[in-house]
Image: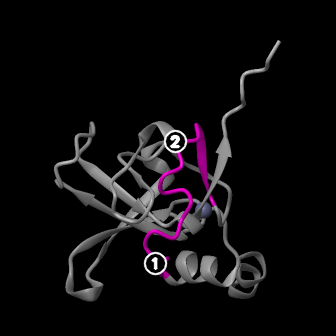
Amino acid sequence: MSAPQVSKTEAEWRAELSAVEFHVLREAGTERPFSSSYEHDATEGVYRCRGCNAELFRSDTKFDAQCGWPAFYAPLAEDRVRYIEDVTLGMARTEVRCSACDSHLGHVFRGEGFSTPTDLRYCINGVALSLEPAQAPTAD
Ligand SMILES: [Zn+2]
C-alpha cells in the first residue's frame, strides 16, 4: 500500500484541527449523531477533506438516510478513499479513510435497502468534511 501523500506529525494535526476534528480524523472518533449541519444540507457543491482539502464527495451523491450523519452513496472517485475492515465494538464494519492524508472519515454500509444507485451508505462525520458550494449562477 502506498504511503499517504499528506503526512503531518501529531503536533501539526493538533495545531490545525479543533479538538473534535482531531478526535474524529486522527483517532477514528465519531461525532455526536444529529450534530452536523451537513446532515440535511442540500447545498450543491463538493465536500472536501477537513484534514487535507482533497475532494471526497459530491452533493449529488448525498442522500437523507436519517441516520444522524451526512450520508453519500458513492465517493467522488474511488481513489479518493480507502477502506479498512474495522472489527471494533464487536461489529464487522468497513472504515472509510481519506486516501490522501489517511484521516478517518466514517464507515460504509452495504445492502440496507436505500433506493440509491449503489445500495451503499457512506456514513461520514460532518466534522471530517468542509463543503465548498458550487459557483452560484451569476445574475445578469
Ligand atoms: Zn484528507
User: Eyeballing the image, is 97 above or below 12?
Assistant: above
Find the distance from the CA under tag 1 to the CA under tag 2: 21 Å
Rendered view: 31 above or below 114: below
Q: Quadrant of residue 11?
A: bottom right
In the rendered structure, the answer to whether residue 5 lies left or right of residue 42 reads: right
Label 1 sits on a secondary structure element that is loop
Q: Which residue is found at the position 46% from the left and 42% from the top? A: 77
Q: Amino acid at mark 2?
A: Arg
Q: Quadrant of the C terminus?
A: top right
Sequence-first disc among 1 and 2: 1
Q: Residue at x 72, y 31 (%)?
A: 135
Residue 48 screen position, x and y as percent? 62, 53
Magenta region: which residues? 28-49
Residue 4 placed where, x, y %?
A: 58, 65
Return the x and y of residue 110 as percentages of the image width and height: 21, 56
Nearer to us in this view, 37 or 18: 37
17 vs 82: above or below: below
Q: Main secondary structure of the magenta part?
A: loop
- 132 falls in the magenta region: no
**39 lies left or right of 140:** left
Residue ID at (18%, 55%): 112
Q: Residue furthest top?
A: 140
Question: Mark 1 = which residue?
Answer: 30
Amino acid type indicated by mark 1 = Thr
Q: Which residue is labeled 2 in the image?
A: 58
